[in-house]
Image (cartoon, rainbow, N blue to C red):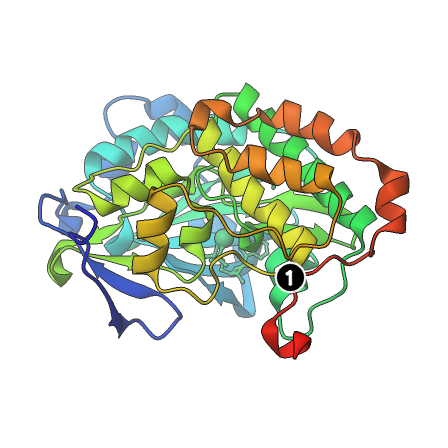
């Protein structure tokens, strides 16, 4: 099944993502049927109405577009304070069953209250898109800080602090039985260089991964595969309908974030998706011998990247591991451990 995917790097979508051909069997729905009664549904009406914000109650500013992601765009608005509204393009929304499931999740997201989790205010609708209303994050994403055009130097002490806050945020979600499913540095903001704020929790379950109208091809955004645990990578290589994300797959993704924090690079950055899927599915992880840091730092990485999901630590355990890092020895080691690229060696 390794070559069933037939990834087509020529089919680049122009945004760094590539399309992958997958065998048919996907399930879709008629988006023309999409309307208010679909979203209200027969069941769960009361909890749904509690989290619905009429679009007219949100003031949208000029130049409101913040950015575009894989599944829609994020715009800036005002609703008793600054908000960001993420409009999921319904072309990309999964089938009706999944929408029902999502409705049930909505209420639980709104009940999350944690310093390191973005505030979820509710959801709004217009006829062609579903908007998720959340607090507006200030500052830069961790991805832009580490890999952006004017990337900043992240000291080891800050790296540990951000990682600790991410652990605390996600262990709170896990304790509430919410799986993030899309933990990556693009979904983490660092506000005033102080506080890590995690966004986009659970939204992944809404998103359609395959496109029947495009030969059941699958969009593989740049870098996304680096966060996927081997058990998910193996599902991608097969005939999947949904990916079986778990608390342990969130831990694997956290491992990749930790790697980025300590190396300022992304695992398998220059590799073709075919290669990543083949190797990661078989248990290969990014090599660590070039990473100049203490054993304990690498140990966290290796544990989070364990091939068997059950061998990965919980986020609470990760938090303890981070707490127990030998701060004194870290101070003496290079403050900015890096994977040196060949250009800088020769
Ligand atoms: P991605 O996560 O791949 O960057 P998104 O659709 O989630 O794609 O986000 C699109 C853009 O909107 C990105 O630039 C992202 O940083 C920004 N964004 C998303 N959520 C928020 C938020 N709550 N506050 C401010 N900006 C946000
Ligand atoms: Mg995002």
Residue found at the very far left of the displayed protein: 24
Vertical position of residue 62 compared to residue 37: above or below = below
Query: Residue drawn at (41%, 64%), measured in percent from left and top?
Result: 271
In the picture provided, is 331 more to the left or to the right than 166? right
Q: Residue at x 34, y 35 (%)?
A: 231
Q: Which residue is mark 1?
A: 339
Kindly state the secondary structure of the residue where label 1 is placed. loop
Query: Does residue 298 lie above or below 248 as drawn?
Result: below
Q: Is residue 311 above or below residue 128?
A: above
Q: How many badges with numbers are in the image?
A: 1
Q: Residue at x 18, y 54 (%)?
A: 3
Give the residue drawn at x 40%, y 41%. Answer: 283
Tell me if mark 1 has few (under 14), some (14-19) or many (20+) residues whose alpha carbon lies within 10 angstroms of its own: some
| Residue 42 in sight from this viewpoint | yes
Residue 49, image x and y in percent? 40, 30
Residues 308 and 46: in front is 308
Residue 89 in the image: x percent, y percent? Answer: 32, 56
Quadrant position of the C terminus in the picture: bottom right
Q: Position of residue 186 (x, y in %)?
A: 55, 55
Q: Is residue 116 visible?
A: no
Q: Nearer the viewer, residue 81 or 344?
A: 344
Residue 107 in percent (x, y) is at: 45, 27
| Residue 303, quarter of the rendered image | top right
Residue 222 occupies which quadrant of the picture?
Answer: bottom left
């Amino acid at each position: 099944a390794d070559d069933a995917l037939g990834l087509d790097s020529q089919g680049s979508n122009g945004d760094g993502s590539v399309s992958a051909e997958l065998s048919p069997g996907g399930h879709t729905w008629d988006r023309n049927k999409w309307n208010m009664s679909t979203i209200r549904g027969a069941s769960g009406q009361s909890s749904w109405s509690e989290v619905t914000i009429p679009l007219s109650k949100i003031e949208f500013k000029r130049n409101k577009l913040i950015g575009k992601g894989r599944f829609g765009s994020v715009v800036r608005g005002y609703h008793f304070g600054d908000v960001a509204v993420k409009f999921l393009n319904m072309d990309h929304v999964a089938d009706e069953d999944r929408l029902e499931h999502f409705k049930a999740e909505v209420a639980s997201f709104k009940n999350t209250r944690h310093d390191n989790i973005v505030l979820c205010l509710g959801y709004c609708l217009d006829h062609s898109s579903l908007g998720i209303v959340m607090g507006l994050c200030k500052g830069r994403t961790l991805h832009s800080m580490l890999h952006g055009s004017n990337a900043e130097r992240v000291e080891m002490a800050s790296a540990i602090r951000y990682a600790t806050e991410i652990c605390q945020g996600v262990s709170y979600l896990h304790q509430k039985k919410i799986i993030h499913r899309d933990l990556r540095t693009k979904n983490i903001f660092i506000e005033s260089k102080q506080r890590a704020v995690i966004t986009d929790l659970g939204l992944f379950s809404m998103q359609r991964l395959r496109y029947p109208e495009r030969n059941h091809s699958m969009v593989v955004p740049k870098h996304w595969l680096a966060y996927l645990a081997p058990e998910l990578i193996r599902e991608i290589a097969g005939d999947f309908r949904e990916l079986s994300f778990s608390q342990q797959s969130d831990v694997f993704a956290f491992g990749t974030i930790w790697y980025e924090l300590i190396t300022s690079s992304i695992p398998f950055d220059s590799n073709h998706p075919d290669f990543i899927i083949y190797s990661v599915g078989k248990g290969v992880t990014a090599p660590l011998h070039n990473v100049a840091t203490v054993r304990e730092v690498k140990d966290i990485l290796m544990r989070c990247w364990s091939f068997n999901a059950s061998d990965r630590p919980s986020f609470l355990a990760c938090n303890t591991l981070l707490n127990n890092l030998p701060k004194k020895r870290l101070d003496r080691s290079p403050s900015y451990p890096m994977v040196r690229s060949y250009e800088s060696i020769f």
